[in-house]
Image (cartoon, grey):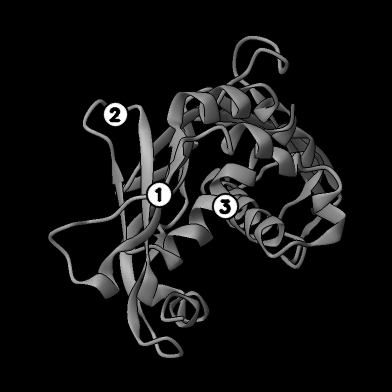
Amino acid sequence: MNIAKLLLLGVLSMTRAEDAPAERWPVFKARANIDTIKRGTHARDHVAFDAFQDVPVAPSVEGYSDVKMSLSPQSGSVEDFDFDLSMKLDDLGAESRNVQFNGSGVYNGSPFTFSGPIDHVKMSYYQTSKYNSIHKYDAIVFKERDMVLDINPSKVKVDGADVNVEFLVSEIKKALTKHKSEIQDADQEHLKHFPMDIAMPYVFFFYAVQFSQDVSITPDGKFVQLDFAWDHFPFLSKLKKH
């Protein structure tokens, strides 16, 4: 069963808010089980490392050439690696404190290697709103925070050339941020290595909330719930009147 089907295992139910005006009655409420989504993601999230192999670093910096790096777990096997996942309205995303980089290149004609831990890597979104000028309502949206990449230069090991480590770390951060953005922008070269099925629940959630009247986490913390209103679906509102 793929991850998209797992997402749809949430409970769908027709509802009516008795104390709300008729035009604000939810069309339906959709629930998705948070643990099910996380388990499905953990089944293959380690494959994301495939998309971060031989990432170019400092490609246009004078003195540097053929600098590339790859990501891997600091401890344990790639197959056993899991990102720490969050499905909170103020923190939707993934993070880890168990990622490292290894790479090589040439600096001023001298080959060198480098390696070090990423103390904390995190990509996350938070809930906010944006006015939908077409259908004229405030849509719920998730906005991305800056990517967290905590790399301590004192922990980075460089062999073979007199490289400025702090500069190298800044270029590593730029390279990883750019690479991540290219994956998000559906760059075909990167996408062929990225397991898109693990992103499906988050992609669905990211866009579905924009049509919802409300989004919430149930009191027991087990489900994310989306309430869809008539006035967010103009074509359904017209059918409702007949």
Q: Quadrant of residue 152?
A: top left
Q: Earlier in the sequence, mark 2 or mark 3?
A: 3
For mark 3, what is the residue?
A: 204
In the rendered view of the protein, which quadrant contains the N terminus?
Answer: top right
Marking on residue 221: 2
Q: In this rendering, does residue 167 appear at all?
A: no
Give coordinates of residue 226: x percent, y percent.
38, 51
Q: Earlier in the sequence, mark 1 or mark 2?
A: 1
Compute the Cα span from label 2 to label 3. Answer: 19 Å
Between 14 and 1, the residue placed more toward the observer is 14
Whether residue 9 sits left or right of residue 79 in the image: it is: left
For mark 1, what is the residue?
A: 14
Q: Residues within 10 Å of mark 3 (few under 14, many from 20)?
A: few
Q: Which tag is nearer the camera, tag 1 or tag 3?
A: 1
Whether residue 222 sits left or right of residue 104 in the image: it is: left
Q: Secondary structure at mark 2?
A: loop
In the rendered image, the vertical position of residue 40 relative to residue 202, given as above or below: above
Q: Residue at x 32, y 48 (%)?
A: 89
Q: Residue at x 53, y 22 (%)?
A: 98
Which residue lies most toward the top here?
76
Q: Which tag is nearer the camera, tag 1 or tag 2?
A: 1
In the rendered image, the vertical position of residue 22 relative to residue 30, given as above or below: below
Q: Residues within 10 Å of mark 1 (few under 14, many from 20)?
A: few
Give coordinates of residue 239: x percent, y percent.
50, 78
Amino acid marked by disc 2: Gly
